[in-house]
Image (cartoon, grey):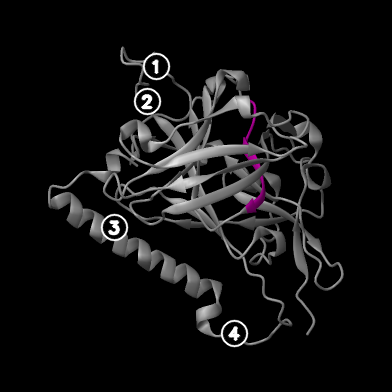
Amino acid sequence: MASNPQIRPATPTAAVKSDDIGELFGGARQWSSEQWIASDDRVRGGKSQSYVRISNSADTATFYGNLDITALGGAGFASQRTTSAAGGPWDLSATSGLYLGVDDIDDRIYTLVVKDTILPKRPDGREQSTLSYEFSFSIRGQSTKASRMPGPLQNQSPSDLVGRPFVLALPDRGPEGDISTLPVTLFIPWANFRPYYRGKKKPDAGSLDTSKVQRLSIMCRSMFGLQHGDFSIAVKFLSTLTITDQTFDSQTVFYQLSNIDCGGNVENFYVLYTSVSHDAPGTPQSRADTDDKAEWDFIEDMKELLIEEEATASSGKVEVGALN
């Protein structure tokens, strides 16, 4: 049976003008383990652990570990953050947002965290809490390495795309069974990084000051018990992108992510639904196999978790929101 044309995600040079890319990690600025350090819930009595593994060629960083939610009553987080060796602070005010190349990823929800303020450490050596600006995303499917994306955005100019997160991709009509090994390329506008304080939304806080970015982090958190266990995300590059009318190749295809609004204190996140179906176009599928059904079930699961979280909070147990 003939397969659907695969979507081959764009590389920085294939679809984006290189002058508009500001490399932070990856590419010419090779990954280094000295630039990242664990920041896990163990500082609050948890048991989660995170690590970073750099490929032999230093062109990929794999962030992985285990998210444990038993020690903190359903809460937990594991993350890797930048160190002073990474080169910050950064003045990124002239850019449009972050540009992330993901080579391989599981179905977990991941959070990019940006801080513009770091306070002096406490007398006991622990860091003081400050506002974080966060964007959470999930690429849900069997693998990013053989994915068929949902329908692309139509007739979009670069100016239309600056204010929304999207995925870049180029159509690949190669031989049947061809599997892309290029990264899924995600753009996140600065405006989509929302303020949080110790895991809780702070909608009245000011916007991120991109002229003095102090720290970047990649986090996997429990999302109020939604996820736990092993996680892994392989990142090819983490850069900035400045969007102009000449930034993108004329053949670039844009895919918008679905915004999942969980309400309450639970962090919103964006989802790109993928599938690896090799059925011929037009082959009937059951409703259970459709992306719409998957999204509906996912939202219903989140609503149930919110009800459970509210019941837990009213019973006087540990407030997990302060620990997430």
- Which residue is under mark 2? 130
Secondary structure, mark 1, is loop
Q: Is residue 309 visible?
A: yes
> Could you say which is closer to the camera, residue 192 or residue 142?
142
Secondary structure, mark 4, is loop
- Residue 207: image quadrant is top left
Q: Report how far apart the C-alphas of labels 3 and 4 lie in the structure.
A: 31 Å
Secondary structure, mark 2, is loop
Residue 101 among those drawn in magenta: yes
Q: Is residue 195 above or below residue 168?
A: above
**In the image, residue 305 lies at what x, y percent?**
31, 60
Q: How many marks?
A: 4
Looking at the rendered structure, which numbered label has been put on residue 183?
none
Mark 2 packing: few (<14 Cα in 10 Å), some, or many (20+)?
A: some
Q: Residue at x 59, y 19 (%)?
A: 88
Amino acid type, residue under disc 3 in the picture:
Leu
Looking at the rendered structure, which numbered label has been put on residue 119?
1
| Mark positioned earlier in the residue sequence (2 or 1) | 1
| Mark positioned earlier in the residue sequence (3 or 2) | 2
Instruction: Name the quarter where the N terminus is drawn.
Output: bottom right
Q: Residue at x 31, y 15 (%)?
A: 124
Q: Is residue 231 above or below residue 51?
A: below
Looking at the rendered structure, which numbered label has been put on residue 306?
3
Q: Report how far apart the C-alphas of labels 2 and 1 lie in the structure.
A: 7 Å
- Residue 122: image quadrant is top left
Q: Report how far apart the C-alphas of labels 4 and 2 lie in the structure.
A: 48 Å
Check if mark 4's residue and mark 2's residue have beta carbons within 8 Å: no
**What range of the chain is rendered magenta?**
93-104
| Mark positioned earlier in the residue sequence (4 or 2) | 2
Q: Residue at x 76, y 34 (%)?
A: 27
- Which residue is under mark 4? 285
Horizontal arrangement in the rendering, residue 41 relative to residue 151 (left or right):
left
